Amino acid sequence: MSWHADSALMETYALGVLDQAHASSIEAHLLRCERCRDSIAHLLGRSRLDGLWAGIEERLDPARPSVIERVLALFGVPDHVARLLAATPSLRLSWFAALAVALGFAAGAARAGRLGVLLFLLVAPLIPLAGVAAAYGPAVDPTYEVALAAPMRSFRLLMIRAMAVLVTSTALVGLAAMAVPHLGWMAAAWLLPSLGLSTANLALSSYWSPHRVTAGLVAAWATAVVLSERLSSVHYAAFHAAPQAVFAIVAAVSILTLARRREAFDMRRRA
Amino acid sequence: MNDTLDGVDSDALPTVRLQGIEKRFLHTRALGGVSLDLGTGILGLLGPNGAGKTTLLRILATVLAPDAGEVRLLGRDPARSQDRLEIRRRLGYMPQEPGFHRNFTAFEFVDYVAILKEMTNRRRRHREVERAMELAGLSGVARKKIRALSGGMRRRVALAQSLLGDPDLLILDEPTAGLDPEQRLRFRDMVSRLGEDRTIIVSTHQTEDVAALCQQVVVMNGGQILLRGTPRDVAEVARGHVWLADGRDPRARLAWRTAEGRHRNIGDAPAGAELAEPTIEDGYLLLVGEQAFSEAA
């Protein structure tokens, strides 16, 4: 080897700003020339070397998506929707763990008799309600403001997350209900109240702050169940045909309200 | 005739046009009749805590609606749904306290925001995420969990998401808070290059960043604009009010010992005082008055 790479060219190459033609020429030479390899090693800064290694590592061993994203991919959910859902606070493993504990206690109580069943029926609709409340909003989503300033409509993001939370939490509560023996038709009695409360929560959140709406609905629901049980001559009065019809109407009105008020989710209402 | 950032009159539509913007939160007036026209270039927004900077930036980022006044961004009205969508497609926003999904890696987080910015094609999106991360100097930490990153690195992640899609209007709220000196220099280099062909609004407490980066400065206090001009104009406010003495002058509102061992005094200079060349920091302190003096003390 009778010649070596020009030092100015080597410095430009080491900075990563040399044009493609000269860079290829330098690389071809470096493969054959030990002396130039030694000199380029001194020219490359530590941070650039680290960056190059990180890039190689990324190509060879790409990061794996989270458990939630991998599960969603199994169900055919597109990767970009899966990533939106992975950022949902009420679709995290820690949320499901807390939910499993709450359902375990409620289902255990339901085995103990009428009051236990009533407790289970009271708690069951609140689980999807809490999940929907924790899906999106200024108090629960750390990236709320960044999401607001992005072109994707906040209402669409809210709906994607709320639907996913409703489906998963309803399925889990349904499984817990089936684990309670001798419930009969009561195993499904929480479904319409759950739908009514969750959709009402979303619709009312277009007017008032979501956490206040959620707290108000939880208090109103618990009061209604306890009072109807004490004042009525029949058991489980809050779950009979007339209240079920009311919850179906509440759900329908809430869905219509949501469609009309979707723009209200597009900007902050407070500082 | 429009007043553009670089001080050149132009018939082109300004990127930002605010007319009499007002905003109240309960009994507090956050903005009281702010008017501003901006074209291409970098504008620094200076002001003490509670001056109304963040409220103004939220209105510019289409996140908050004003109570009164007219807003035009990129020639469109953010109060209209379709216009707002078009503005957001050309907007980059880094909030003052950017939150993160801490279980995400830096790459996953920027990728998440790219999805919110309507980039659904995975390959093209990932290329854009890589470009924004490289621009923010994050290539080496793409796979690190956000919870494992330092405060300065997290701010760079927040900066990277704001650069996605090469926005025409870039709004950065306290972008240099928590950055070390080297990171701040890299930030200045990057922003000054970006500011050549777009409008960048930077809110900061760092007067030296404004002096080094911005062609224009707006000084705010109490929800109003106190001064709009060049960094030199802000410094000129303090001309004749900064003097050097061997000790702390009891007449000075603020004084500190310099590296040369003498005291730099700011306030009403006594007759015969050895006047010093004012800096943008001196002008800012005099403009915003008691609040800035108490914050600086």
Image (cartoon, coloured by chain):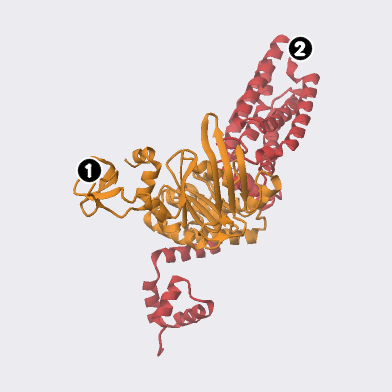
Q: Which residue is tagged 2?
A: A234
Is A136 positioned to the left or the right of A45 in the image?
A: right
Q: Assign the N terminus of chain B to one quadrant of the image.
A: bottom right
* Nearer to the camera, A102 or B34: B34
Is B292 positioned to the left or the right of B271 in the image?
A: right
In the displayed structure, A20 sits above or below B170; it is below
* Nearer to the camera, A213 or B270: B270
Query: Given the current orientation, which residue lies at the most extreme front position?
Result: B271
**Tag 1: amino acid:** Asp
Q: Assign the C terminus of chain B to one quadrant of the image.
A: top left
- The percent coordinates of residue A131 (x first, y second) are 63, 34
In the displayed structure, A30 sits above or below A246; it is below
Q: Chain of mark 1?
A: B
Element at label 1: loop
Q: What color is chain B drawn in? A: orange
**Tag 2: amino acid:** Val
Which chain can be seen in red? A
* Label 2 neighbour load within 10 Å: few <14, some 14-19, many 20+: few
User: How much space separates mark 1 and mark 2, taking CA atoms?
Assistant: 86 Å
In the displayed structure, A113 sits above or below B125; it is above
Looking at the rendering, which quadrant does residue B164 occupy?
A: bottom right
- The percent coordinates of residue B216 (x first, y second) are 47, 55
Can the viewer see residue A111 in this picture? no
Mark 1 or mark 2, which is nearer to you? 1
Give the residue at x 72% y 36%: A261
- The percent coordinates of residue A167 (x first, y second) are 70, 38
- Determine which of the numbered discs, if any, sits on residue B249 in the image: 1
